[in-house]
Image (tube, rainbow, N blue to C red):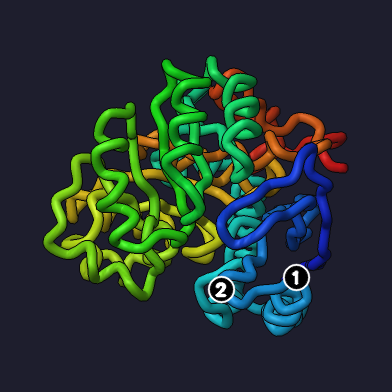
Amino acid sequence: MSRLIAVRPVSYPLAAPFRISRGVKTAADVVVVEIADGGHIGRGESVPYARYGETVAGVEAQLAPAARLIARGGELSEALALLPAGAARNALDCAIWDLRAKTSGVSVAAATGLAVPPSLVTAVTVSLDTPDAMADAARKVADAPLIKIKLSSEDPAARLTAVAEAAPDAALIVDPNEGWTFDILRGLEDQLSRLNIALVEQPLPAGEDAALEGYTPPFPICADESVHTAADLPALRARYQAVNLKLDKSGGLTEALEMLRAAKDLGFTLMTGCMVASSLAIAPALHLAAECAFADLDGPWWLKADHPGGLRVESGRISPPAAGFWGDGVDAEGLWL
């Protein structure tokens, strides 16, 4: 059976600049895949990430052979097999999950056995800035139970103190995005031990994290850039206590489900995270969130405008989108920009 497929770039302006140790962004530039079959449309969204050599144009080019195969009536599984783990496969994989739910009437929650919680705590992010600006940002979200702090190697102690004092009741995820050395990590150990630290996420560059072997931290260290697929997990057990499952790294929900099972078997604490993107990119990850100790899914919170009926992020809690938005086996109109 032939299907119609569209691959298109979308840019969502941000409400405020989003800064991390590698740079700043003012818009979320994503790729959306839509597959139409029998009056149903399955949708998926991904974020090409420069850290992994991805661009919007490059992801569109990656998807072109898969799109041609689908348009000719090829098997969806064969189209996925053309793509490596990464943003291109994520957009296609999530569109396929959504399409299958809509054509079968069987929701993704029912198919996976992973129900979407009616509400869950998500980290809200304070992006990298001056200590004073970060304190101001933290005060605005001080009622959130969990705050993620973006840091670099430049005076992280002052920025940590500023946020912790501005939001004294929140647990903290510290995220240098590979921006520290092992010496910086050890130098901050006493300060971090005195704070309410939930996780320290990917402090060292992925290629230099062997330094963590044999280190017993007073706080859990979470792999992010060091882990992409289930095959990466066994080698990380001696370095990390937790892993961050991100659909754009794993290449979609299918591989992320394999990672979830494998990481549990290996005894990792689990976190599910996201890039800055719309609710369409985040909705599939909600199926992982109920099985994870931590969720960092505030991507849509950064946008000037999200999809109508999308996720709701208020006071550090996230609620699922409206019926028919993604993966629940229902078609709905009026939910798309």
Q: Secondary structure at mark 1?
A: helix
Q: Quadrant of the N terminus?
A: bottom right
Please give the label number shown on residue 52: 2
304 horizontally vs 319: left or right: right
Q: Pointer 1: residues within 10 angstroms few (<14), some, or many (20+)? A: many
Residue occupying image coordinates x 25% and y 34%: 193
Work out how far the residue at label 1 is from the one at label 2, CA to CA, in angstroms.
Answer: 12 Å
Name the spot of residue 24 as percent of width and height, x first: 69, 55
Closer to the camera in the image, 299 or 40 = 299
Residue 287, given in percent of the width and then of the height, sits at 47, 41
The three-letter code of the residue at mark 1 reads Val
Q: Is residue 257 left or right of residue 239?
A: right
Q: Nearer the viewer, residue 250 or 136?
A: 136
- Number of the label disc, if any, that sits on residue 81: none
State the image quarter where residue 168 is shown.
Answer: top left
Q: Which mark is residue 56?
A: 1
Q: Quadrant of the C terminus?
A: top right
Mark 1 or mark 2, whichever is nearer to me: 2
Residue under the point 79% across and 52% down: 27
Corner quadrant of residue 195: top left
Q: Amino acid at mark 2?
A: Tyr
Rendered view: 85 above or below 326: below
Tell me if residue 139 comes above or below residue 209 in the rendering: above
Residue 292 in the figure: left or right of residue 279: left
Along the viewing direction, whichever of 4 and 59 lies nearer the viewer: 59
Image coordinates of residue 332 in percent, x first then y, are 78, 36
Q: Is residue 243 above or below residue 92?
A: above
Name the residue rendered at 78%, 59% in the picture: 36
